[in-house]
Structure formats: C-alpha cells, structure tokens
C-alpha cells in the first residue's frame, strides 16, 4: 500500500483528508507543522506529500527545498488558495508534481493522486532495474552467474536457485525478472519458511469468503497477484508434501483454485524457487517430490558464497563504502 503524508497547520483539514484517502486504501498520516512533517516524511517513507503552500515558520516552497536537500524523493501536491497560485507555479518549476486550489475538489484530488502513485510505481521499477542490472563482482564465478542470468532472463521456464543463506538468491531472482519481458508486471516474493502450514494455501492461491474462520472476504493469492509477472518461492523446501502436490498442478496445468472455490483460474506466471538446503538429498529421502523438483529445476542456478570468490572482496567493500557515503551525504 502506498503511503501519503498530509501537511497543513489546520488539523481539521488534515483529518478530513486522512479519512477520505484511507477509504481509498492508502496509508495516511498528517503533520500540523513543518518540523513534524520533516520527521514524519523520513519515518513514514512517504510516496506522496500533500502540503499547504502557506504555513507558519516555513513556506511550502522552503519545505519542498528542505525535502530535496534531505534526499527525500516523495511526490508533492501543493494545496493553495487562489492568491498563492504564483507560489505553487514556482514550486512546480522546482520539481513539485501538482497543485490544487482551495476549496479542494476531492474527486480531482483522487485522480491526481492515482496518476502520481502510478508514476511512483514506474519510478520504483526503473530504480530496481538499475539496482539489479549487474550483481557486484568481477570474479569468474560472478561472470558465469551473470551469463546464466542473461541467458535465462527472457525465457518463461521455471528456475531453481540454490545457495547458502545470505549469498544473494533473491538478488538473482529480481535480476531475472527485471531483465525479462515480464519486467512491467509484478514481482511477488513469498517466504515459504515464514508461512504457517494452515494458511500457506490461502496465501499462495487465495480464498473465497467464508471458506474458513477469518475468511471475511474474497482474497487474491500471491499467484494471482503475480499473473503476467514473476513469483519467487523463497525456501521452497519448507512447504509440506500436500502443498507441493497443489503447486505441481499449477506448474503442469497453469491453473489454480482459490481455497473454498471449485472454479479453476488460468494463470500465466514465471516461477522462480530458491532454497539453501540440499534439495536432491531431500528428494532421495522422500521429503520433497521428485516430479516437482524436475518441474522447478528446468534452469538451475547456483549462487556461490563469498568465500568461493575472494577476489570480489575489495570491489564489494568499495561498493558498500560508496553506498553508505551516498546515503549519509
């Protein structure tokens, strides 16, 4: 859910806006002065800030410039009375996104927010693509890994990524997605190890209202949310044999059923599974289905631990020093 911060010295206006936007399924907070707003903008990590242009202590433009200096890249909508329009225009020339005149037209506000939130999603995906365009390292092991990613990215075949905890399996999964033709659609990560056995099928496939205690409304599962995109099943070896059977059917038939529903739904999703365990040993010991293993292991990728690519140590240190330096300014 996207996060919005409202900044206005009139608390009654902030409360009304908060109620309206929460009804639209946004996470909303508000601040009554710029000092509080600066603190909350950082802690909330707001995607969008809606701010009055005229406030005590600091104008909206000064507030916006302060946000830029602090490297807070939230989208901005300024609220302004008619006489303050020149200030709002100046703010937009500095890079603010939109302005609205008071009294607010709430339908217009909702439309502008939806447009800006949509832009946020595009910006996020662009950033992620840059972030995962190359995995840090110059060793032969990393070069081979990158070659495999480049080869596998544009296929829809399932991928099984194996490697120790902390070796970068999710990084590889995201690199595969954001270099693929599915990059404009969702990348959905599921931590199988963290899901209770009783709810894992509901989480993966969704459920129908009333199908079990607590199912108060229809819910889409992770597979449905990842349709046309990629789903990463992290620590796949932690799911039960019963759930493995249902997952096998999804891979074979490209169909699934929500819990409590008898309707088969078509799905087009690329499955990337990861594990830090010896999955072949688990197959031999009948702890993991062999047919599911072969369905998942179409493109196998092994992520080498750092101790097997010691020549990358210096470049990794330099990378993280630069990253910390950029963040701290």
Image: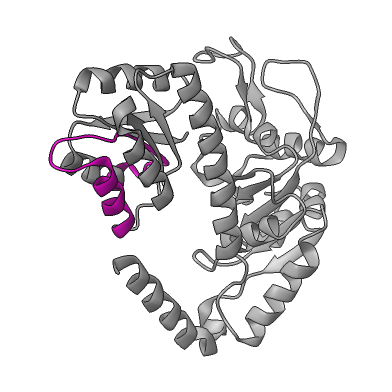
Residue, far top? 210
Q: Is residue 254 above or below residue 93?
A: above
* Front-most of residues 311 and 64: 64
Question: Where on the picture, by quarter, is residue 85?
Answer: top left
Residue occupying image coordinates x 64% and y 49%: 232
Where is residue 32 drawn, in percent x and y? 19, 31
Residue occupying image coordinates x 74% and y 75%: 147
Where is residue 204 drawn, in percent x and y? 64, 34
Q: Which residues are magenta?
A: 42-69
Residue, far bottom? 311
* Front-most of residues 136 and 273: 136
Whether residue 276 is visible, yes or no, is no
User: Which quarter of the figure is the C terminus placed in?
Assistant: bottom left
Q: Is residue 238 magenta-colored?
A: no
Residue occupying image coordinates x 30% and y 33%: 84
Horizontal side, residue 9 vs residue 206: left or right: left
* Front-most of residues 99 and 300: 99
Residue, far right? 253
Where is residue 184 drawn, in percent x and y? 69, 47
Residue occupying image coordinates x 20% and y 22%: 11
Q: Is residue 317 above or below residue 49?
A: below
Q: Is residue 86 above or below residue 214?
A: below
């Amino acid at each position: 859910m996207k996060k919005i911060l409202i900044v206005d010295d009139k608390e009654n206006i902030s409360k009304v806006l908060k109620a309206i936007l929460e009804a639209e399924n946004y996470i909303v907070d508000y601040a009554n002065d710029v000092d509080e707003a600066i603190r909350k903008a950082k802690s909330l990590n707001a995607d969008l800030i809606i701010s009055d242009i005229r406030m005590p202590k600091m104008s909206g433009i000064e507030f916006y410039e302060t946000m830029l200096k602090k490297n807070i890249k939230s989208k901005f909508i300024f609220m302004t009375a008619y006489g303050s329009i020149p200030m709002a225009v100046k703010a937009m020339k500095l890079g603010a996104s939109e302005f609205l005149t008071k009294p607010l037209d709430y339908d217009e506000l909702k439309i502008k927010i939806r447009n800006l939130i949509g832009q946020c999603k595009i910006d996020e995906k662009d950033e992620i693509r840059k972030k995962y365009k190359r995995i840090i390292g110059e060793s032969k092991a990393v070069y081979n890994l990158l070659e495999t990613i480049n080869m596998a990215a544009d296929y829809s075949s399932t991928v099984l990524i194996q490697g120790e905890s902390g070796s970068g399996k999710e990084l590889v999964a995201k690199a595969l997605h954001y270099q693929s033709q599915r990059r404009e659609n969702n990348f959905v990560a599921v931590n199988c190890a963290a899901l209770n056995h009783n709810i894992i099928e509901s989480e993966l496939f969704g459920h129908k209202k009333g199908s079990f205690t607590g199912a108060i409304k229809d819910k889409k599962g992770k597979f449905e949310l990842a349709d046309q995109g990629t789903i990463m099943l992290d620590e796949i070896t932690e799911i039960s044999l019963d759930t493995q059977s249902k997952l096998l059917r999804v891979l074979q038939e490209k169909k699934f059923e929500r819990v409590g529903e008898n309707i088969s739904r078509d799905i087009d999703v690329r499955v990337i599974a990861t594990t830090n365990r010896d999955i072949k040993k688990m197959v031999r010991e009948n702890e993991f289905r062999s047919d599911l293993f072969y369905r998942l292991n179409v493109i196998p990728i092994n992520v080498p631990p750092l101790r097997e690519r010691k020549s990358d140590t210096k470049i990794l240190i330099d990378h993280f020093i630069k990253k910390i330096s950029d963040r701290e300014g």
